[in-house]
Image (cartoon, rainbow, N blue to C red):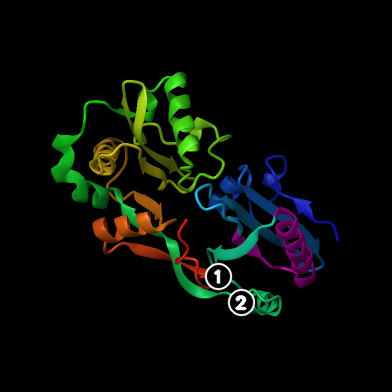
């Protein structure tokens, strides 16, 4: 049975099977997708290549699974096992959408039991962000800039600063990704005297939601994070409806604490996952 890699060259063949977000992500450098076709249909696995520079941890995080044929699914899962072994990756799961009982039974037999749980992603609205930051707007420094205001040289300094500091957020292909991936009006940075003091990057995804990709301060002023949130809220008001979703991934303890403090009522996205994903500190 032939295992096929999913890429930009053949993604159109899978668009009717996969969610829009899966199609958007699988062609990125930090994702891998494979498919195989059996007598009962096509099975698909898509995983994210997680490489945390600060901890050295490397994982294959399974994000999407389709099991229409168990023999085909066995082929692509064997491919994943070999791939992870070759690259020395830990395999973990945080799968959006439902997972069939045959798939769960198969994974359990392979010693990868998964269960329904709380995902790392939480969803707030533009209005939520506006309400939380409104009283701090007068304090935004004059050297705050939107991503759209930066020239190519300044954009390069922003990315180099993040790479130098090992700050990826959830953008594990930051070194190669096209800067047009980021929403240029709401994304912003603190840029003073040629120095990057802070970065806040968001992406407008295929479903129209804003994904928080990277939020980091590089100065000694802890208020810089709030300044960037304030600026993003202020500019988002002018470009998006107040009920537009903002997706925040609690990818480490600092982000989890920030979400708990600012958005205690934020709803997490339910997923099928292995145990302990939320406890990992990257």
Q: Position of residue 18 (x, y in %)?
A: 61, 55
Residue 237 lies, in percent from the top left, at 26, 40
65 is within the stretch colored magenta: yes
Indicate the quadrant where residue 81 lies. bottom right
Is 267 placed above or below 172 here? below
Q: Is residue 117 visible?
A: yes
Instruction: Identify the residue position indicated by label 2 in the image.
Output: 113
Looking at the image, residue 230 sits to the left or right of residue 65; the answer is: left
- Give SS at disc 1: loop
Residue at image coords 48%, 25% = 156
Which residue is drawn at the image coordinates 63% and 79% (left, top)? Answer: 101
Q: Which residues are magenta?
A: 61-87
Q: Is residue 211 above or below residue 185?
A: below
From the viewer's perspective, is the residue at label 2 or at label 1 nearer?
2
Q: Position of residue 254 (x, y in %)?
A: 36, 55
Residue at the spot 17% in from the left edge and 38% down from the top edge: 137
| The magenta stretch spans residue 114 | no
Residue 211's spot in the image, x, y percent? 42, 47
Q: Residues within 10 Å of mark 2 (few under 14, many from 20)?
A: some
Instruction: Say which label, 2 or 1, has the lower sequence index.
Output: 1
Q: Which residue is mark 1?
A: 98
In what quadrant of the picture does the N terminus appear? bottom right
Q: Main secondary structure of the magenta part?
A: helix
Q: Badges 2 and 1: C-beta atoms under 8 Å apart?
A: no
Q: Residues within 10 Å of mark 1 (few under 14, many from 20)?
A: few
Residue at 64 percent across and 56 percent down: it is: 46
The disc placed on residue 228 is: none
């Amino acid at each position: 049975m032939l295992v096929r890699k999913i890429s930009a060259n053949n993604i159109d063949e899978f668009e009717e099977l996969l969610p829009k977000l899966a199609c958007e992500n699988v062609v990125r450098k930090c994702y891998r997708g494979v498919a195989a076709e059996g007598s009962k249909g096509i099975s698909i696995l898509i995983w994210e290549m997680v490489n945390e520079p600060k901890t050295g941890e490397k994982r294959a995080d399974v994000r999407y699974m389709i099991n229409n044929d168990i023999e085909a699914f066995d082929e692509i899962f064997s491919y994943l096992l070999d791939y992870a072994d070759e690259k020395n990756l830990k395999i973990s799961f945080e799968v959006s959408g439902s997972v069939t009982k045959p798939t769960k039974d198969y994974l359990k037999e392979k010693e990868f039991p998964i269960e329904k749980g709380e995902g790392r992603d939480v969803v707030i609205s533009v209005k939520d962000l506006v309400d939380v930051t409104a009283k701090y707007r007068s304090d935004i420094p004059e050297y705050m800039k939107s991503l759209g205001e930066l020239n190519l040289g300044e954009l390069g300094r922003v990315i180099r600063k993040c790479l130098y500091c090992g700050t990826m957020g959830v953008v594990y292909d930051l070194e190669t990704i096209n800067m047009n991936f980021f929403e240029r009006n709401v994304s912003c940075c603190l840029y003073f005297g040629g120095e990057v003091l802070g970065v806040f990057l968001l992406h407008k995804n295929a479903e129209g939601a804003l994904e928080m990709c990277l939020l980091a301060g590089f100065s000694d002023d802890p208020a810089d994070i709030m300044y960037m949130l304030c600026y993003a809220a202020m500019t988002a008001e002018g470009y998006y409806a107040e009920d537009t979703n903002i997706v925040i991934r609690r990818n480490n303890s600092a982000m989890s604490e920030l979400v708990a403090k600012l958005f205690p009522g934020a709803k997490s996205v339910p997923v099928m996952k292995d145990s302990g994903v939320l406890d990992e500190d990257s």
